[in-house]
Structure formats: C-alpha cells, structure tokens
Image: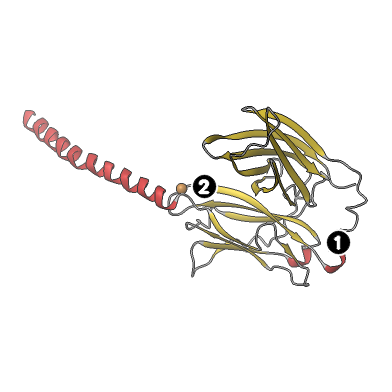
Amino acid sequence: MTKFRYLDNKRLILSVSILIPLAIMMLLISNLNQNVYSHANPTSFTPPSNSVVGENGILPENVVIVFSERPEPKASYIHVTNSDNERVDKNDYRVNSNNLRESSISIDTPKLKPGIYTVSWLALSRDDGHITKGSYVFTVSNASNRSETGVKEMTNNDFVNSTVVNNVNITYRISPFYSGINNNFTVSLSDLDGKAPTNVKTVFLVFSNKQAGLGPISAELTKTGEGQYSGSGGYLSQPGEWDVKMIVQRNDAYDLNHSFTFDIKNPP
Ligand SMILES: [Cu+2]
C-alpha cells in the first residue's frame, strides 16, 4: 500500500512539474496571438462603406468583407437588408478558398431598388475564437433619383439635444431626421466659457438598432469649424429605436462619452 502511494505521489509531482510550465507557456502563446491579431476585424468592404452604387446602371452582385483573421464559415454571417429590414442577399455566405480571410454573400440584384442598404456581419475567428460584429451602409442610386427628389419638400423635423459632459457643452443635431435616407449629423463643442476646445482629436458616432439587429455602425465626423464636427450618411437605415454612442477623443484628456436614444420614422 505504502509503496503504491509513494509511486502515486511521485507521478503526481512529475506531472505537475510538466503541466505547470506547459500551462504558463500556452498562456503566453495565446496572449501573444491576441496582441498580434486582436480579433477578426474587417480590413475592407465591397461595396465600400457609405458608397453610392448603381449610378452607372451597374449593381453590385456580391458583398465582400476581408478580415484580419479567418472567419469560421459555420458560425459567421453577412446579411444585407433594405430599409424595411428585408434580406436582399441570397443567404449563401462563403469563405474564399484562396483567401481564408475573405468572406462574401451574393446579392439578389433585382431586389436592389434605390435606397439605403445595411450590411451586418458577424465573424467568429478561427484564429483566436473571438466574435466580432458590426454593420455599415451603402446607397443604391440611379440616374432618375440622383437628386433625391422629395428631400427638399420635407417638413423640418430636426432632432436637437444638448448635454454637459466633464465641463464641455455638447449640442448635437440630426437633420432632416428621417430613416432610410441621408441625414446630416452635427456636433458642437464648447467649454463652459463658450470657447471651442482645442484638444479634440476625433468625434465618433456609433449607431445601433437592437430591434432590427443592426450595428454597431461607426461614423467619424469631420471638423467643419471651431468646435464644429459634422458628417452625413444613411446610417439610420431603418425606422425604430436607435441607440447612439458619441465618443469625443481628446489629446491629453479622457474621452468624452455620451449616449442617447431616439425613435425615428420613415419620410412622410
Ligand atoms: Cu480576438
């Protein structure tokens, strides 16, 4: 009995002495992988984010997304939806056998009427097992609706709100504030003494519509004046409730973060 126990202990000590360094090594390797690859992030979109297609009569037949890591085809997806949240893709998600980081889906092109389309994607990385997701929008136009007939006659329906975050006044406006069309987004920043802050690097708006399963859709605004940041796009591609996160990145200061929610309707 004692002899067996002695042997067991010896075996235990031996296995621990091998397993612990092995576990530490594996931990180090997995950390290293994370630092080098950091999830399956998209590196390119076709059609590109916020692009206008169809003006020359040519419609995109596929949506192609290239990632920084290999998406697992059984668990990853791309969905393309119109502004009524109807799928306009052919549900044939695949990964390119010649480039395992490139995934695509076919578009049912007869369904591509002029309007705003949302591409929503999810990628389970085969390289580190992490899930990433997001959305972006593109516009289908044609020669006849190029001037977006009807927009000018729309009644003024702007969404305007103000807040103070870390002693910075923030006023934000969405115009004309209808879903499924291009909206203008403006953010105005001022200190409590009314001056424009000089340490602002970038202003981002990140849009999500949980009911429709859209987002996060990220939009970087452009500086258009002292303390003025704006951009335009079809980010609010569908009606309903949207959550928006505003992130103001600053030099030598923490980000300013502000979240807001609203309900948006289709144009009348
Ligand atoms: Cu990762």
Earlier sequence position, callout 2 versus callout 1? 2
- Which residue sits at x=40%, y=48%? 35
In the image, residue 54 sits, relative to residue 229, either above or below, namely below
- In what element is the residue under mark 1? loop
Q: Is residue 141 left or right of residue 135?
A: right
Q: What is the quadrant of residue 118 in the picture?
A: bottom right
Rate crowding at label 2 as few (under 14), some (14 to 19) or many (20 or more) other CA atoms within 10 Å.
Answer: some
In the image, residue 6 sits, relative to residue 133, either above or below, namely above
Residue 139 picture location, percent across and down: 75, 59
Q: What is the quadrant of residue 244 in the picture?
A: top right
Ligand 1 near label 1 (Cβ, under 8 Å)?
Answer: no
List the residue tagged with mark 2. 131
Which disc, if any, is residue 147?
A: 1
Residue 84 picture location, percent across and down: 79, 51
- Which residue sits at x=22%, y=42%? 21
Residue 86 picture location, percent across and down: 75, 53
Three-letter amino acid code at the position of disc 1 = Ser
Q: What is the quadrant of residue 63 in the picture?
A: bottom right
Which disc, if any, is residue 252?
A: none
- Which residue sits at x=79%, y=44%? 239
Q: How many marks?
A: 2
The span from disc 2 to disc 1 (Cα, nearest Å) is 40 Å
> Foreground mark, 2 or 1?
1
- In what element is the residue under mark 2? strand
Three-letter amino acid code at the position of disc 2 = Ile
Which of these two is toward me, 86 or 112? 112
In the rendered image, the quadrant that contains the N terminus is top left
Ligand 1 near label 2 (Cβ, under 8 Å)?
Answer: no
